[in-house]
Image (cartoon, coloured by chain):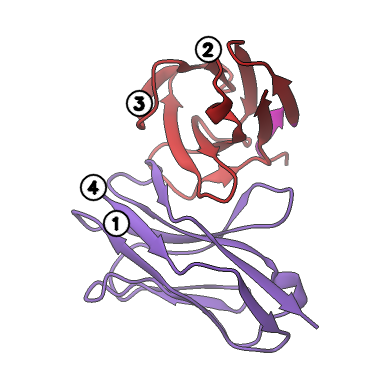
Amino acid sequence: DAGVTQSPTHLIKTRGQQVTLRCSPKSGHDTVSWYQQALGQGPQFIFQYYEEEERQRGNFPDRFSGHQFPNYSSELNVNALLLGDSALYLCASSSLGSSPLHFGNGTRLTVT
Amino acid sequence: GNSVTQMEGPVTLSEEAFLTINCTYTATGYPSLFWYVQYPGEGLQLLLKATKADDKGSNKGFEATYRKETTSFHLEKGSVQVSDSAVYFCALSEGQAGTALIFGKGTTLSVSS
């Protein structure tokens, strides 16, 4: 049974560019959440998707947007990249109304 | 707002030593509490959880008790192993299960043989 899978594993972008990260949830899960983990910090909640809609959002600017597809997979898009967007981006899945979250190994984004 | 505070690391121990990592929280309601572990190059794995006051979560020799009176959820292990070397995160979730987690900054544990 595959767990949460994320792609790509590493990515290097230039300031001002746009990036798309992808996530496939664990089998049987219908809810996807995204977290940003800066170096040496704990993960910070970006947003959560269920039934293809954003259910909950953390304190992140509109440059961060997402999408969930009918097969429950999800994308995280970041526009107008800043140096400060460099981080490990973690995807987590769950079944709505239940815990715990299952995390993927993350995508390491470097903005130069 | 809700928050989690963990003791700062790194924590360096010899194999078979006793481990305590302190965690306190601030929450407006009755949160669920979690400990996650992150091994190098990997995502987070749930280590243990507790959903109400006085619950004790346990897994792989690790334990933590939900103390509402002291708003704490300290992680303990009686005898650490080299393989326990990792970053440990305390987290809380308030409201419906599966809602957003609020994490502490993490505590790095290094165990030497």
The residue under label 1 is B31
Image side of residue B16 versus residue B64, left or right: right
Judging by colour alone, the chain drawn in red in this rendered image is A
Q: In this view, does B51 lie to the left or right of A9?
A: left
Quick one: B57 or B92, which is closer to the camera?
B92
Chain drawn purple in the picture: B
Q: Foreground mark, 1 or 4?
A: 4
Chain for disc number 1? B
Q: Is the C terminus of chain A in the top left, top right, bottom left or bottom right quadrant?
A: top right
The mark closer to the camera, 3 or 4, is: 4
Q: Quadrant of residue B91?
A: bottom left
The local secondary structure at tag 2 comes to: loop
- Which of the two residues, B49 or B74, is positioned nearer the viewer here? B74
Residue A71 placement (x, y as % from top left): 59, 19
Residue A8 shown in magenta: yes
* Amino acid type at mark 2: Asn
Residue that carries the numbered disc 2 in the rendered image:
A79
Q: Quadrant of the N terminus of chain A?
A: top right
Q: Earlier in the sequence, mark 1 or mark 4?
A: 4
Chain-order first, disc 3 or disc 2: 3
**The residue marked by circle 3 belongs to what chain?**
A
Chain identity of mark 2: A
**Residue stretch in magenta:** A4-9
- The one of B10 and B82 positioned closer to us in this rendering: B10
Residue at horizontal 65 percent and vertical 89 percent from the top:
B17
- Nearer the observer: mark 2 or 1; the answer is 2
* Residue designated by label 3: A55
